[in-house]
Amino acid sequence: MANTTFRTCPDTGLKLFSTTETLIKANAVLGVVFLLIGGTYGLFVGLTRWQAVHLLNAQDFYMVLTLHGLNVLIFWLIFFEIAVLYFASSVLLGCRLATPKWAWTGFALMLIGAVMNNVIVLQGNSTVMMTSYVPMAADPLFYLSLILFAVGALIGCFVFFGTLVVAKAEKSYEGSVPLVTFGAITAAIIAVFTIVSGAIILIPTYLWSIGVVSEINTLAYRLIWWGFGHSSQQINVAAHVSVWYVIAAVLFGARPLSEKVSRTAFLMYILFLQLASVHHLLVDPGTSSNFKMFNTSYAMYLAVMASMVHGLTVPGAIEAAQRARGHRDGMFTWLRKAPWGNPTFSGMFISLVGFGFLGGITGVVMGAEQINILIHNTLYVPGHFHATVVLGTTLAFMALTYWLVPVLFRRELILKGLARWQPYLFGLGMTGVSLFLMGAGTLGVPRRHWDIGFAGTGGITHEFPAAAYTMLALNGMSVILAVIGGAAFCVIIVGSLLFGKKLGNEKISPPIIAQPVTDEEYNADGGSAYAIPGTMALAMIFFVSFALYYFINWKYLAETWGIA
Amino acid sequence: MKDQDQTESGQVPMMQKLLDNPFLLLFIGVASPSILYLGWGLAEIFTLPVR
Ligand SMILES: [Cu+2]
């Protein structure tokens, strides 16, 4: 049966089962297709909010905004994540994929759901935004398409768990699973909760839309929907952190500084990350401050701590490996000597820094109930999550893709010169998007708003400062830059798959994977490689920025209400 | 694997047993937010005194 045929990758030595390989390719390619679609919609959103351009009319704007959110936040990321799950189980554990038929069924459901969703929203009567809050009603098929997609993704998760069982039964690995697989387990666990929450709320909503159920409690809808909406973004976090570890290992031969610490940090994700869903409900009535604060402060801080652990150990592992390989001078020689021209590295490193500094710090500020009120429901929120999910997750996935094309598809990358620059273009554009959206949000500009000039609203107006308009214009320009970077990625990847030089079954030179750093190398020079002063310095810069920004927000809050 | 060794008596430490059991982790990872987020939140919403 086809499920037992495999090839051994001449470069990595990994055992690639043909069914697994085809499924990974299919999921990853479809992911990129939805990234292209969703990114294009993002361009229209950015150009409409740029008040001087104001591209779309109100009707189209809200429809396109709905499509942008669903295509990139759900379809692109989850397709790619299923590919990551299959890679982290079948490929890394060197065993066949459990029940490939089910894997294809899941894939088909996801594809049908995603295409159907796009078609339904484009028909114009499901302009309900990604959140589709009731009692705003969409076409029943809108909910059904999301349910199909979610069921497909859930099947993918169970194929992943099944593959873990197969690997254990067939003893294809010894001891504990590799750290990257453990990270994927974390992502899959969060995915199960995400999808179950989605089903709990979307199924009754579907029944409501066809008239079987008479009413959906709006508060309960928002609570359960965010169990889906927030947690889905935490699948991304667990997945892109795993991707960071993969890239550190393949490019530098780096070993995690401590398996124990990294695994414990993933465990903290499993326990606490999803509880932060409450931060979306901080101004909702119906739940108590105890509920809000326990979940967004106490629990969320433990999850944030886990992210900081990963943010320290990934560059730390790279630093130790670089030092062991001879780049021992000064604080940052290891970083200067890193392969900045390799998009797999530059993409990963920009992802790490962007996720930590822009996404992480602002996330904590938004999670604190008191200072959240400063920016709740403003453009600051999209500013924050473009830093986490686009700069962080999407860029990490792009970086990994550059590495996977030669390994899985046995094709050489085309347009290598452009590929060198792509992460910088996309990273710079997205950094701009995040910062300028946050800037506009700080000035009070609402999110999801077609026209802050309130044209045609019959006099109900609020004057925004001129700086808000400037922010939106700068955001529009950054969007263009990011879209050029994103389009370059799609062109390079799709072009390489179609026209890249076939690599056959020979070893690629220069080698695409670094030899693991040996104990001898780590222990040379009295084990000085284990000291990681450069990473520690970066961590200090992070903590100082974090504390300062946190303090500034409280100061700002204090000034909002004068105490007489 | 370094750090993952068994203790001297040959016993696997508790914590490692937990980390090596994906289905136990799955249970914990679904139960934790189901109770603390969905359960607690819905309990508050549905016990609101509505007139
Ligand atoms: Cu969230």
Image: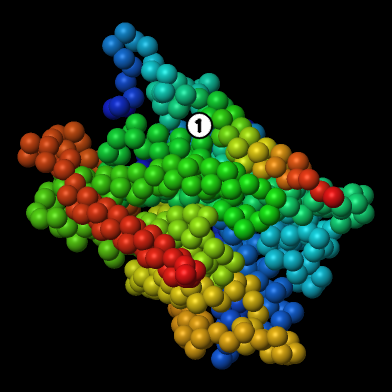
Tell me where residue A538 appears, x and y as whole percent: 25, 56
Instruction: Say which quadrant the N terminus of chain A sits in.
Output: top right
Residue at the image position 32 percent from the left and 21 percent from the top: B5
**Which of the two residues, A36 or A100, is positioned nearer the viewer here?**
A36
Tally the numbered discs.
Answer: 1
In this view, A216 is above or below A516: below
In this view, A542 is above or below A239: below
**Which of the two residues, A444 or A164, is positioned nearer the viewer here?**
A444
Label 1: few (<14), some (14–19) or many (≥20) C-alpha neighbours in 10 Å: many
Q: At label 1, which amino acid type do we have?
A: Cys
Residue at the image position 92 percent from the left and 54 percent from the top: A211
> Dividing the picture into quarters, in which one does residue A336 lie?
bottom left
Tell me where residue A258 appears, x and y as whole percent: 29, 35
Tell me where residue A238 appears, x and y as whole percent: 48, 46
* Residue identified by numbered label 1: A95
Parent chain of label 1 = A
Q: Is residue A9 visible?
A: no
Q: Secondary structure at mark 1?
A: loop
State the residue lying farthest toward the left: A525
State the residue lying farthest toward the top: B9
**Which of the two residues, A276 or A52, is positioned nearer the viewer here?**
A276
Q: How is the image coloured?
A: rainbow
Is A448 on the left-hand or right-hand side of A89? Answer: right
